[in-house]
């Protein structure tokens, strides 16, 4: 209810409640007179913008499953070149619908998976982009590997998907930009009607059940002990991608037993290693090589993260634990065939020296499995 009075030639209006007893006050805030209020705000969505440009398209439309036509129809995906075409070339890929796609229980999923595999295996696409799926949907998601503006394609038509025959597709946008996205919530364990925000600051938290934990030793033909003569024949011990699940790796452990472990050498051997142990990770189809390990010092200072080194010295043998703890920033070994047959992610350790005088030595990766 408003009450008006006349004061110094002006009409003064005050706002009161229905009972006429309480008037609204005014506070000076940031140089302006503002109505004094107490506000309760409900946040419906949290929005943020990833640092990598992205675009996506559906086989058919985004809300149907009927986009796949006949065998022999094609879907052409075109992406314009970046600012340095020799480094970031244009992409032009044509996928031909097969009879198997048409006969599949979910044709749009079959075509989606085949296109993702073809894109991730394409040499030009690999230089700038990665493709992924939207689970349970016939949607192909394409994201730049290049942060910020380098991944943008801002001219209308820079991204195009063209079907032929009776096959249909729908693109989200004809340009590729960094766009604001909603934040996904995890349902509360105690009350599934409520959501729990899985992000605190810049740390991403992905919940998983105990049965989904992953603990695997690097192996060569079933052998997991690294104490072989790799000087004569360099030998790879490996953890390969698995079917149906991505492996998120939180920790890498090198651990073993030997008598007389010393610094300035490699464990109990008489000297540092000549060639060294080489760890290679292929994650999201990108290969990374860790610093070479040649001595006990390297295990402690170059490989292990802070506080993740332990040496127990006993009369019967010295136990070494060197651990690289990744915590909330795991790397991922994508499920088999994500990037095409024979092009899987992996984790491997290469032994290039004679370690046969070490009692035993293992390399273990620890994390969890998650559906792609």
Image (tube, rainbow, N blue to C red):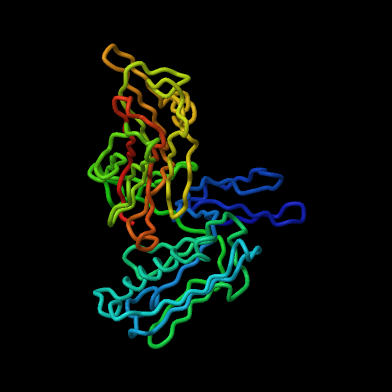
Residue at the farthest front position: 232
| Residue 302 on image: x %, y % | 49, 30
Quarter that holds the N terminus:
bottom right
Instruction: Quadrant for residue 337, please give it.
Output: bottom left
Q: Position of residue 372 (x, y in %)?
A: 34, 57
Q: Nearer the viewer, residue 353 or 203?
A: 353
Rendered view: 47 above or below 313 = below
Depth check, front residue: 307 or 287: 287
Q: Residue furthest right?
A: 9
User: Measured along the vertical axis of the image, is residue 369 above or below residue 301?
Assistant: below
Nearer-the-camera pick, 173 or 360: 360
The residue closer to the viewer here, 137 or 360, is 360
Q: Is residue 91 left or right of residue 44?
A: right
The residue positioned 60% from the left and 68% from the top of the image is 81
Residue 46 placement, left or right of 210: right
Q: Is residue 169 visible?
A: yes
Q: How many marks?
A: 0
Q: Is residue 190 visible?
A: no
| 249 left or right, relative to 56 | left
Q: Quadrant of residue 349?
A: top left
Q: Position of residue 342 (x, y in %)?
A: 36, 60
Is residue 181 shown above or below 218?
below
Residue 44 position within the rendered picture, expressed as x and y whole percent measured from the top left: 44, 55
């Amino acid at each position: 209810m408003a009450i008006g009075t006349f004061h110094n030639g002006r009409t003064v209006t005050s706002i009161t409640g229905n009972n006429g007893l309480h008037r609204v006050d005014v506070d000076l805030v940031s140089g302006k007179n503002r109505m004094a209020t107490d506000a309760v705000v409900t946040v419906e969505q949290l929005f943020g913008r990833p640092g990598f440009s992205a675009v996506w398209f559906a086989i058919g439309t985004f809300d149907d499953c009927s986009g796949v036509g006949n065998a022999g129809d094609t879907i052409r995906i075109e992406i314009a070149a970046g600012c340095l075409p020799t480094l970031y070339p244009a992409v032009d890929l044509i996928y031909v619908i097969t009879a198997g796609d048409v006969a599949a229980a979910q044709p749009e999923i079959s075509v989606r998976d085949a296109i993702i595999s073809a894109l991730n295996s394409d040499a030009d696409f690999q230089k700038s982009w990665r493709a992924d799926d939207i689970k349970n949907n016939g949607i192909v998601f394409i994201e730049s590997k290049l942060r910020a503006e380098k991944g943008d394609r801002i001219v209308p038509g820079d991204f195009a998907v063209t079907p032929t025959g009776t096959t249909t597709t729908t693109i989200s946008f004809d340009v590729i930009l960094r766009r604001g996205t909603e934040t996904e919530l995890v349902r509360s364990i105690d009350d599934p009607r409520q959501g729990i925000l899985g992000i605190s600051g810049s740390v991403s938290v992905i919940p998983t059940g105990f049965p989904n934990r992953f603990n695997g030793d690097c192996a060569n033909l079933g052998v997991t002990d690294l104490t072989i003569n790799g000087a004569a024949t360099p030998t790879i011990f490996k953890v390969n991608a698995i079917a149906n699940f991505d492996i998120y790796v939180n920790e890498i452990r090198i651990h073993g037993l030997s008598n007389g472990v010393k610094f300035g050498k490699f464990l109990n051997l008489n000297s540092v290693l000549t060639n060294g142990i080489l760890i290679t990770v292929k994650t999201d189809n990108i290969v990374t090589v860790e610093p070479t390990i040649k001595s006990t010092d390297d295990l402690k200072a170059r490989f292990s993260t802070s506080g993740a080194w332990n040496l127990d010295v006993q009369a019967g043998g010295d136990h070494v634990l060197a651990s690289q703890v990744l915590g909330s920033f795991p790397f991922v070994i994508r499920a088999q065939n994500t990037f095409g047959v024979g092009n899987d992610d992996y984790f491997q350790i290469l032994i290039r020296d004679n370690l046969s005088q070490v009692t035993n030595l293992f390399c273990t990766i620890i994390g969890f499995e998650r559906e792609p």
